[in-house]
Image (cartoon, helix red, strand yellow):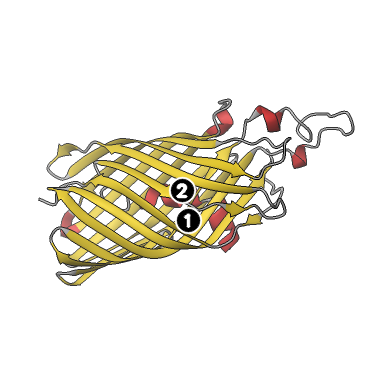
Amino acid sequence: MLGVLTLGVLWVVDSASTQAQLPNLVEVRGQYMPSTEIPEQAPLSSQVASYDAALNVPVRLTERAFLIPGLAYHVDSVSFSNQPDDFTAPRAFHSIEIPVMYVQLLPSDWSLALRFAAGLAGDFHAVDADLLRLSGMILASKTFSERFVFGFGGLAGYSFGAFFPLPALYFAWEPITQFRLETFVPAFLSATYIPHHRVEIGGRAELAGNQYGVRFSGIRDEPPCVDGPDASADPARCLDNLAYSVGSAGLTLGVRVYESLWFEAYGAYAFFRRFEPKNAAGDSIDIDSFPREFFFRFGIAWRIPES
């Protein structure tokens, strides 16, 4: 089950978890992974740097209903070292997403959040309909007090011919004013200590990932995707898309820069890193597990004001 979750649907989890409650108005992040030797291709090494940008615009429909359309962009930039002379590979994988979230406040301190997103994900050397992906989330939440919120619902996603449904649970608890425990299953668990109204420190564990279409001509116009001088094309071995997943745990820091503008940092240990190349039928060509590594993520977030 873990392999199915992490390699098949983590892009849905990662996308929806950022909006388990209300999303940030503006967010810009960068993440750096150290260079790692690629399994079974030593001494070839790769280094991945990731960047995110997101914009969300809350619109009040009524006193108890809100619509939040947005735009999100993510890129994984890959650099290689010690590559052989004939080595060729995509150097960047992109995803663009347009989410729309609807929030309805209900009687008895209940609320309902509906989210739908459509986007494209791939190396963008060519763009076709197979790069389209769709995702959705429904989450019903009950505010039991100012310190305790519980929610439940589900996630679903469609990409590269596969449909992925998942249950979802949300939990937020503040046993004291300075401490907050929050989780969105199956995406993250966080504990945050607030020693000052401008500082947040804590711990976090998360699962994240993405799935990209591969249209790079150096792969798609070469065997086994096409006939070669010594072999016929083999669709079962032709790389169509690539799933990438990371499980991590580490420390978080948030510093209020001005009003609702925050600097955020996450230093973590990636205890799980995996690539899964797939053919057009959705079958795995191979699965590569990468060494565990420390990494660092930082960014600026303009949060929705609490009042």
Image location (x, y in percent) of residue 209: 49, 50
Q: Secondary structure at mark 2?
A: helix
Quadrant in which the N terminus is drawn? bottom right
- The foreground one among 38 and 73 is 38
Residue reaching furthest to the bottom: 175
Image location (x, y in percent) of residue 150: 28, 64
Image location (x, y in percent) of residue 35: 55, 51
The answer to whether residue 74 is left or right of residue 173 is right
- Circle 2 is placed at which residue position? 12
- The foreground one among 261 and 307 is 261
Residue shown at 60% from the left, 43% from the top: 80
Residue type for callout 1: Leu
The quarter of the displayed image where residue 27 is located? top left
Tell us which disc is closer to us: 1 or 2: 2
The answer to whether residue 282 is left or right of residue 263 is right
Image location (x, y in percent) of residue 169: 37, 62
- Circle 1 is placed at which residue position? 166
Q: Which one is earlier in the sequence, the residue at label 1 or at label 2?
A: 2
How many residues crowd around disc 2 within 10 Å: few (fewer than 14), some, or many (20 or more)?
Answer: many
Instruction: State if disc 2 and disc 1 touch (CB < 8 Å).
Output: yes
Residue shown at 41% from the left, 49% from the top: 31
- The foreground one among 294 and 8 is 294
Measured in 3D between alpha carbons, the distance from the residue under mark 1 to the one under mark 2, in whole angstroms, is 9 Å
Residue type for callout 2: Val
Residue shown at 67% from the left, 27% from the top: 217
